[in-house]
Amino acid sequence: MHDTKGDRFMVIFIYAFLTILALTTIYPFLNAIAVSFNQGSDTAKGGITVWPRHFTLENYAIVFKDERLMNGFFISVLRTVVGTITAILATAIFSYGMSKKELVGRKYYMVLCIITMYFSGGLIPTFLLMRNLHLMNSFWIFIIPSLIGVWNMIIFRTFFQGLPAGLEESAKMDGCGNWSTLFRIVLPLSGPVIATLALFTAVSHWNEWFVASIYISKDDLMPIQTILKQILASNIVSEQTAGLDAASLAHMQKAKTITSKSLSMATMMVATLPIVCVYPFVQKYFVKGVLVGSLKE
Amino acid sequence: MAQLSVKTVESKPPLKRPTNVFTTFMKQIDLQLMVLPALALIILFSYVPMYGIMIAFQDYKVGSSFSSSPWVGFKHFAYFFNSPDFALIMKNTIIISLLKFLIGFPAPIILALMLNEVRRMKFKRIVQTVTYLPHFMSWVIIGGLIGSLLATDNGSINMLLEKLNLIDEPINFLSMPEYFRTILVSTNVWKEIGFGSIVYLAAIAGVDPSSYEAASIDGASRFKQIYLITLPSIMPVVSIFMILAIGNLLSAGFEDILVLAPNPALRDVSDVIDTYVIRVGINNYRYSYATAVGLFKAVISVGLLTIANYVAKKSGNSLW
């Protein structure tokens, strides 16, 4: 291929543009990391970009000593683990049933599912339902309403239908029922699709904050994202230090080096860390998952 | 993307003889037990709230059931249309939605076209890895990052503007109504541009390479090839996503607004239908009224989706 002068100009422009885009995408993260490791009073003087000037771990020390934040972290981990395992299991069982052509009523069941993708009752009727079900201020509000995902069901079902029919036939001949075929034959073969959907589910559980903000008022059930939202909105340092023991509070006041900004950046980093840890896997599977979802169908 | 699955609905009826459906049902009871509990959950958490929409036409009182409240017809709708909030909320919703659509929709397509021109695979992979990242962060984190960038103390944007001598003292961007829409829309584009490009990149990868060779022999420049080959080849995907985006047009999004505009001072530019429903419904307990406002939005969205699909059908790329 012979590039014209215009082409060469276009290519240079594209490389320059993409470089700038990548830098502006990564910069806010690097900046937040630098601020979280920098002494708060020093940050207030300005000039911190991607490297801490006055390195310190005191912001993180405060965050890790804050009982409310640590409890929030624990709630987030718990809802992510429990929510992901139960949702994947429940949806896999549902999808396997729906993948069987002999299932009586399958067509009607499917219509029932599809309608929910276009219509919903909206926020307020859902809110009133949750209240009537006594899910307010209950850990199960994070788990039960999101057990069955119609979209995940369709992906699972498509995958199950693509498995060689002979496998299941031979299992049936050996006397396996539908349930044992699912657990002994089908699920062990479904590694990639389970991984993809589990990552989808886990990331959305970890990032979810709105549900807790309207259904939860008890501090000990708040996930870290919701706490962080409150901290960022008010950004009052006293709110965050309220849970500290007297000794560290005294130490902090003596030092006077911690600011609300440096604390909230450290909190943000703690809330982001799990995502960054799984990101390499997420990227691998998500890209696949998006394509399974949108193009293959 | 979820809505694309419509095409997978089975059209073949299940194998059954009408005389003994019940017998067949009982014979496959283990299979039915796999799906019935899940369907019960779907009915409970999706259909019961749909049934609950009826409180939009009632005066729902706390503690009563969905069906036992007095009927008031379109009172809440009339109240909303006549309220002083209506004009402001509709204006904000339409402006924010349109800006997000007009800028946020083409942006990933342009990025995909650009990425496709990159021949250095390592560079391409790095750009992709970096630009997908913000998609996986919650809006809370993104709000915190943007807040920190725009802050008056050690905010990088203010530092940069001061270095360039464009401003004398730091601007408190996030408390000024005139900057809010720009911040909101650019943050949205910034967060989703990379991830949104995946689908289009995949569509581009499916274009037959021989058409590029032919065009190249005919002397078409690379820009012309993008314009004459790549773009037309991905139009079916583009139009499907456009229909979906139009259906979601009124859902201006509320998470981003809630995290970027916690300040009531910004309400004149940031209050949209969704945030209004949350405020009057959840915070002020006006359940019937808020449901009516939400229903109003849902009806318009379905209308928009139908119109968009009708137009797309005429051009041959429809959803259903």
Image (spheres, coloured by chain):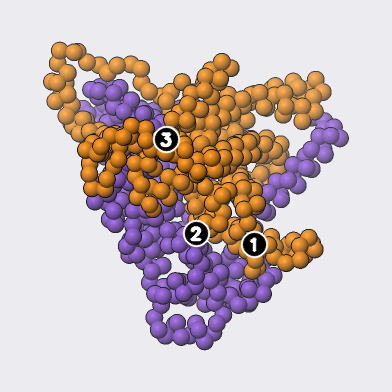
Residue lying furthest right: A5
Q: What's the amino acid at mark 1?
A: Asn
Q: Are marks 2 and 1 in contact (CB under 8 Å)?
A: no
Residue A155 visible (yes or no): no
Chain under disc 2: A
Image coords of residue B309 (percent x, y): 51, 22
Determine the residue positioned at 44% across, 71% down. A239
Circles 3 and 2 on the same subunit: no
SS for callout 1:
loop
Q: What secondary structure is marked by label 3? A: helix
For the residues marked 3 and 2, what is the alpha-carbon distance in whole angstroms? 45 Å
Which of the 4 image quarters holds residue B219? Answer: top right
Residue under numbered circle 2: A272
Residue A55 in the image, given as x and y percentages of width and height: 60, 76
Taking the image as shown, residue A80 lies to the left or right of residue A290, namely left
Residue located 27% across and 31% down the image: A97
- Residue B115 point in image, percent of width and height: 67, 39
Of A92 and B2, nearer the camera is: B2
Q: Quadrant of the N terminus of chain A?
A: top right
Mark 1 to mark 3 CA distance (whole Å): 39 Å
Q: Please check whether the numbered discs 1 and 3 fall on a single chain.
A: yes
User: Which numbered disc covers residue A157?
Assistant: none
Chain in orange, by letter, is: B
**Amino acid type, label 3:** Ala
Supply the letter of whichever chain is purple: A
